[in-house]
Image (cartoon, rainbow, N blue to C red):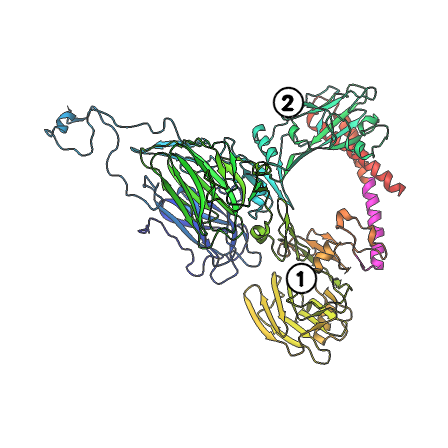
Amino acid sequence: MLSSSGHYEVISGGAGGWSPLVSNKYQWLQIDLGERIEVTAVATQGGYGSSDWVTSYLLMFSDSGRNWKQFRREGSIWGFPGNTNADSVVHYRLQPPVEARFLRFLPVAWNPKGRIGMRIEVYGCAYSCPDNSSGSGCERPLLGFQGCLRLLSIGGKEVDFLSVQQGALGSFRDLQVDSCGIMDRCLPSYCEHGGECSQSWDTFSCNCTDTGYLGATCHSPLYEQSCEAYKHRGNSSGLYYIDSDGSGPLGPFLVYCNMTDTAWTSVQHNGAHLTRVKSSDGESLHPVLFNYTASLDQLQAIINRADHCQQELTFHCKKSRLSSARDGTPLSWWVGRTNETHSYWGDSLPEAQKCTCGLEGNCLDSQYYCNCDADRNEWTSDTVVLSQKEHLPVTQVVMTDTGRPHSEAAYTLGPLLCRGDNSFWNSASFNTETSYLHFPTFHGELSAEVSFFFKTTASSGVFVENLGISDFIRLELRAPAEVTFSFDVGNGPCEVTVQSPTPFNDNRWHHVKAERNVKEALLQVDWLPQKTQPAPADGHIRLQLNSQLFVGGTATRQRGFLGCIRSLQLNGVTQDLEERATKTPGVEPGCPGHCSSYGHLCRNGGRCREKRRGVSCDCAFSAYAGPFCSNEISAYFGTGSSVIYNFQEHSNYTLSRNSSSSAALWHGDVTLTGEMITLSFQTTGTPSLLLYVNSLYGEYLSVILAQNGSLQIRYKLDRHQEPDVFNFDFKNMADGHLHHVKINREEAVVFVEVNQSAKRQVILSSGTEFNAIKSLVLGMILEPHGADPDTRRAGAQGFTGCLSAVRFERAAPLKAALRPGGPAPVTVRGHVAASSRCAAEAGPGSPTRELTRQLSGSAGLSDPAEEGGPFLNTDGSDSAVIGGVIAIVIFILLCITAIAICIYQQRWFYQKNNSRQNGDHAETSLKSELNVQATVNESQKEYFF
């Protein structure tokens, strides 16, 4: 029903919530609101008292329940971020609101350690509500006509409005006679970025749908300005809309953000395929003009913000040169962003005309600086990386040396790649209250938007101030937990204030965004509720300033700001704080210390590392990988397989739970008074050994699944006593589902948590110290000396299934096995194959990458590109030798078959190319010939080896 507070509430599932029987991406929850409602906001929670919540979802809406449309927000085409736990409420205001009767919530991702679970609340008002500018609710529908009438006739007789005004006929109220008071409030239109203006009798409104902007005048950008900004909100790799100039004139566009240690932006073009320069009938083709998914102005904005940009260009040539051997005249060149021509290649200086092989001194023919210039009658190639920012992107490639007999050429151009965002990290440190930076006057007469980050330990200070004769604009930290936006456009001073439940002077970065336009003023700080104040009706609307813009202080040098300001933007234009700071006493360029603000992005034990511009996550002591240490490392264990992690011997020290040492070195004398253990597993086999840790003194810890599938933990910390055995018979855990186990021992107290919900505490009687740690084993154990019969039985059976996120204190055995190169040696026996996630694996037949067992003494011969580095102390067997021989035989047969097929295809394409209908086959023919040449060259290398 429609409540008195003006919002329409729908609670799904009461205290429990909605949780489908099967958790996959084909589930959805549909809500029928009963009538067409203007939906203004949604809120979600997880399932009550569970580990079930949705981390990302799509919102669809419909009037009929048959045709559906997706609501898009936040720059990501993948929808809304959801919950991070089951209890907290995540609320999103829909900008703009949607009018619909039916809503559908489609889960995209959910807690990997739980299931889909949602509680939902929908806010809205009756669709007939004409004005919701106050934001506090809905006004009653209008009952009367607003506008102008003339030539009104009643009963065939024209009404004299002057008689009505004089009281001689009828009555009237709020009526203007003999004039029409309607004003065209949409001329000129104050709606920006293509927003549609509409009006009522006394005001106008802007429809910002599909513009990529928000706010009363469609001024505020909906999307972030770079992939770097998305990364530091915790977003993973994917497709995103970015708006490089914020509220400036350039619109948003779609890019791919590759989140690694830094954020890479990839912009595609229409020529990613292999482009042939000479057609199959011998006629030269016209050069391709590369069109990108963004305009040249948008591309320039990306490049200007980036720390580095590059494009990879690969030439394929057969008797086709890039430059003349006689005088070095360029025979090939490329055209840059401003239509200028360039004949340099790679990272060489402009006009150097050297390919990468010439700079590195490894060309096929040392007489030339490019492989193509050797003019060979066979296919060769040059791959160059163009990285001069001022010349990118490449808009055209020209190769002219294709007129001689048997001359052919082709090329491929990669996407424009840019990394970093120098505007996002542009900062200055203000060291005295009298120091400030000054910039030219801020011209924001009708729309003025100021945004920046700040961090401080001071209780107050002015961030930004710009004055006029009587007008002004100011942003300040007025109190430790209060930020104020004040201004005057001729209607008297106005203030908008955001108050926080916690102080802002915590030496962490806080984001401030203030906007003033002809309709309203607004202020938002971090994720706190936005505060707004409507502009007075028919008041002054132009902000007229004439002084310099002061940053970090005021013209009176009073109430100056102590701390750091970063990424200051005025109407989307970044102000270069660092450049001004180098010339100003009391102000320093840059500001260290980002981990206090962004360290939470490093998950699962990852450690935040400071960089000059931003942070990176060190996953060395985490069982996870990736830019945020959130990529699960999993492996499928075949029958009889195992991973053995041997703790290294080093200097003597004792490691306790309270130790602050960051060393990752282990040795035979290490003593543990407590340990943290995590692992996840998926299996149907019993009994199974999940984890076994032993010592040089006969002490051990084993985590097993008993015959009935119950979880058992056995501690033996005194070799003269029987082990402590704890049986956690929550359920049969050998059910093929993914289960999560967390064990935390503090001396004699052991805390065990299963699947994030079942928790138990037990007390050890066999001791409190784990002495002389020797090794950790996952899977089969041939001879667990001194172990109890149940552990030996489970060890002989081993483990068949999937293990993931295994961690023992700082040791991550699966990570050491799957990604070698760490300090600890690891031994892999049998079939152990990497997998993306345990829950996604179907078993032995799933397409995973097997960890090939190394031949004894040949660990250094493994392929680093494929395996990530050699294993240490990796076990060998006769079966490995036989498998290697079989693999070599199969590989040779495949090579011969491939060469034969390619030769056949080459002849077939040659015959087809004699006809006129050969356009689609020419590129395939060229690729086939290139593949043949590459295969022959590779075969020659292997035969020689």
Q: Residue at x 85, y 39 (%)?
A: 939
Whether 388 is drawn above or below 123: the answer is: above
User: Image quarter for residue 684?
Assistant: bottom right
Whether 143 is drawn above or below 88: the answer is: above
Q: Which mark is residue 807?
A: 1
Earlier residue among tags 1 and 2 = 2
Check if residue 892 falls in the magenta segment. Answer: yes
Q: Nearer the viewer, residue 532 or 679?
A: 532
| Amino acid of disc 1 | Arg
Q: Which mark is residue 163?
A: none
Cα distance in 3D space between marks 1 and 2:
56 Å
User: Image quarter for residue 131?
Assistant: top left
User: Image quarter for residue 297?
Assistant: top right
At which x and y percent is residue 639?
Answer: 73, 62
At which x and y percent is residue 812?
Answer: 69, 60
Q: Secondary structure at mark 1?
A: strand
Q: Nearer the viewer, residue 182 or 589?
A: 589
Q: Main secondary structure of the magenta part?
A: helix
User: What residue range appears in magenta?
Assistant: 872-896
Q: Nearer the viewer, residue 377 or 912?
A: 377
| Amino acid of disc 2 | Asn
Disc 2 residue crowd, few under 14, some 14–19, many 20+, Cα 10 Å: few
Q: Residue at x 71, y 78 (%)?
A: 718
Q: Secondary structure at mark 2?
A: loop
Q: Which mark is residue 339?
A: 2
